[in-house]
Image (cartoon, rainbow, N blue to C red):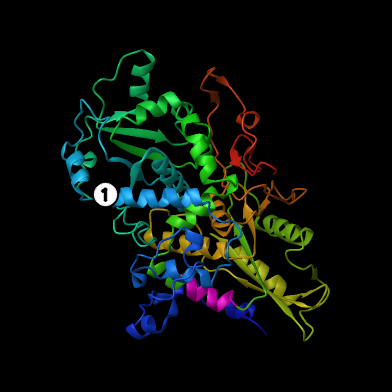
Amino acid sequence: MPGIFPEQAHTQTISDIGPKNLSFEDKKNDPSLSTTSITNDQLLDGLLVSTFDKAMCLSRFQSHLYRKASPHKPSAYLISKLRNYESLHRSCGPHTKSYNKIMSNGAKFSKNSAGIKCKYLVWTASNGLGNRMLTLAAAFLYAILTDRVLLVQFRADMFDLFCEPFPDSSWLLPRNFPYWKDQRHIETYENVLMKSKKNISPEVLPQFLILNLQHTHDGHNNFFHCDRSQGLLQKVPVLILWSDQYFVPSLFMIPSYRQDLIKMFPQKDTVFHHLGRYLFHPSNEAWELISRSYKAHLAKADEKIGLQIRVFNSRNHKTPHQTIVNEIIACTSKHKLLPELDMQKSATYLKKQTSKAVLVASLYSVYGEKLRTMYLTNTTVTRDKVIEVFQPSHEERQNSNNDTHNIKAWTEIYLLSLCDALITSSKSTFGYVAHSLGGMKPWLLRRAYGETIPDPPCKRVKSMEPCFHYPPKYDCRDNRTVDFTSLFHYMKHCEDVTSGLRLVNANS
């Protein structure tokens, strides 16, 4: 039988697997680490460059062995913008003369910042790993558009997740960043914007400015997408971003950036797919977990189905686990993702078998256990399918500030992105990252209420792009409420958040 039998698959979880360092012989014998064997597949059709120490980031050069080549090719213009950005990061990154000069002023005000060559966008972490990765990709795109250097403030819970993405320089914010020491003179974007609206000329611009795009900060978010706002922001040397949102659609609303974006992304629904694959390379520690789990449980299957279950329970609404399991079975049967079960017969199969591996990602162990038991004890209607269920971890609750929790989450996101098809939960940024990295349009489970299974139980999304949950509401020119889907044919409302926006291809 190909693969691991269900009860065997359950015996080893991510929590049981520790990092394993490659020996010198391993590195010497691995063709992906050879300096003479760099292929176009490894460089993702030009997205990546080869000038990295391969042993320092194995995933950068080995991921093509686990993932099918993407049919979505990056544009030549996007590749040129990435090479230009890398050059800017090298010349302006941490500890360069330009960086040291700007930061030596601390948070004091500057009379003339417009002519400064190097400007910065400082990303700070907010909410869970899915939100962090979405907003980090959006921040990187904003940095490219505004000729800023992206620096990230990682706490201890994120240091072991990713490789450095930019050649010959670090994206990590130095610990002596002056903002953390002196916050008395830090302006907020609202204050600068308010002065501008009152025709108070901001002759003395702040050296540092907080750009708050959190979903709870709706008033500010309404005007970030306006050209006038961008004109003010462009004059500030250091922007400190607070965000938990995938605000990429708002960048397409800004007239001064739109043509650049359209040239970078002729296929509008590939923004995160390309930028995510460029930015997010699992660290060696994470890659060890990913590669070992893949080889043990997914590699030999004829087809890999990813199932990501996020339960948003509240005090007044708690869906029984069995209802969600029933919804999953209804969805997989309806769309022929998994074969129907014959509940009257025990599990017996014909000799000529095909196998499907089901990767379950959830905080709760009940989903993997119930699905595993169902397929272990019952045969399929056609009697020619072997279903193997694997759930890497089950933390029972989200703990986004814990490094062990985050490395498990990143491992599962990446494994989901390697599947052939995905079923994900509504409103889950964890699911968004997985399907966008994998270049897939998932089936989205609808939210169940009580014991009633929604009809239909799931719906195929129109785009690979993540949903921007809290988009702007106002037209910058007329300062009136507007539905941006009426202004941009490549924006649609999200299937799981009716007021949200998602980039789609024009013919979607």
- Image: magenta residue range: 290-299
Count of numbered labels shown in the rendering: 1
Residue 364 location (% of width, % of height): 56, 61
Residue 280 location (% of width, % of height): 44, 58
Which residue lies at the image location 52% right of the left edge and 50% below the top edge? 272
Is residue 11 visible in this depiction of the protein? no
Q: Does the segment drawn in magenta span residue 297?
A: yes
Q: Where on the picture, by quarter, is residue 342?
A: bottom right
Q: Nearer the viewer, residue 325 or 255?
A: 255
Q: Where on the picture, by quarter, is residue 416?
A: bottom right
Magenta span dominant secondary structure: helix
> Could you tell me which quadrant the C terminus lies in?
top right
Is residue 374 visible in this depiction of the protein? yes
Compared to 216, does 315 lie above or below? Answer: below
Q: Nearer the viewer, residue 18 or 189?
A: 189
The residue labelled by disc 1 is 91
In the rendered structure, the answer to whether residue 374 lies left or right of residue 52 reads right
> Mark 1: which amino acid?
Ser
Residue 473 location (% of width, % of height): 55, 27
Q: Nearer the viewer, residue 80 or 448?
A: 80
Compared to 193, does 303 lie above or below? Answer: below
